[in-house]
Amino acid sequence: MKIKLFLLVILFSVCNLYAQNVKEDFSDDWANLTKYQKENELLGLPKKGEKRVVFLGSSIFEFWKDKDPEYFANHAYVDRGISGQISAQLLIRFRQDVINLKPKAVIILAGSNDLAGSKGHVTNETIMNNVKSMAELARKNNIKVILCKYLPVYEYPWNKNLKGAAEQIISLNKNIVAYATENHFTVLDYFTPLVDEKNGQKAEYTTDGVHPNLAGYKIMEAVTDAAIMKAIGK
């Protein structure tokens, strides 16, 4: 009897130790909803009079709050960027990371990672379909839409085999502006103040030709604040 009890205790201990060491599998969370889940819960709903703005995008937005955290701390701005994400992932996150936060406006920066991929399945149409779906969801939920002209990119350092990146960005931006104009959405132009003579980013504003440095983000902050003012006022 004592031996059986001892073996049961050992078995229970081994099972408990195994359970503690097994990490939960989040491979089904393709859009990485878990990244901001707890932050969203802690953030809660806007306070009375708060004009919250959500920044939805990929690494350009995610790195922004690291490069210049005071910009977000001093405004009712909520950064919800996740590095590497494509427009379809942003669409999946839209309800949790935008709608449920009850912002006055959302800034949508999408498309570059779609274009920078090497699978060859992405077109401007697929990107725009996702952007349109996000914009329509926002409008239905009384959230002002701010669509971005993407930052200039001459070449992606991690995919130098991709040719014509600059032309693809320019073409996508034309589609975004046309759609925004047709639907009376605010356009936020990150392209014009950062572009150089090759339609890439000016060297003094970027770390790698794709992502801005602090000086680049300062330029972006000025045009962002102007666009937000246009969309929702002070």
Image: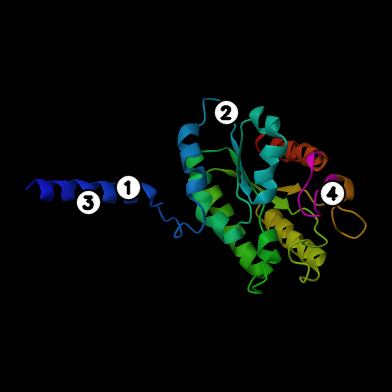
- Please tell me which of labels 4 and 2 falls first in the chain: 2
Q: Measure how far apart labels 3 and 2 are at the Cα level.
A: 55 Å
Where is mark 1, residue-wise?
A: 17
Residue at mark 3: 11
Q: Which residue is mark 2?
A: 50
Q: CA distance from mark 3 to mark 4?
A: 63 Å
Asked if residue 122 can be seen in this view, the reply is yes
Q: Nearer the viewer, mark 3 or mark 2?
A: 3
Q: Name the residue that disc number 4 marks.
A: 194
Where on the picture, by quarter, is residue 127? bottom right
Q: CA distance from mark 3 to mark 1?
A: 10 Å
Residue 223 is situated, as x and y percent measured from the top left of the image, at 78, 40
Place of residue 186 in the rendered image (x, y in percent of width and height, measured from the top left): 70, 47
The alpha-carbon separation of the residues under discs 1 and 4 comes to 54 Å
Residue 9 image position (x, y, % from top left): 19, 46
- Number of marks in the image? 4
Which amino acid, by three-letter code, is at mark 1? Leu
Front-lying residue, 101 or 66: 66
Counting residues from the N terminus, which is met first, the one under dot 3 or under dot 2?
A: 3
Residue situated furthest left in the rendering: 1
Tell me if label 1 and label 4 are in contact, CB under 8 Å.
no
Is 148 covered by the magenta stretch? no
Q: Residues within 10 Å of mark 4 (few under 14, many from 20)?
A: many
Tell me the SS state at disc 4: helix
Badge 2 amino acid:
Glu
User: Dots 3 and 4: beta carbons under 8 Å?
Assistant: no
Please say if 159 is above or below 24.
below
The residue nearer to you, when weighing 154 against 232, is: 154
Q: What is the span of residues highlighted in magenta in the rendered image?
A: 205-214
Point out which mark residue 188 bears.
none
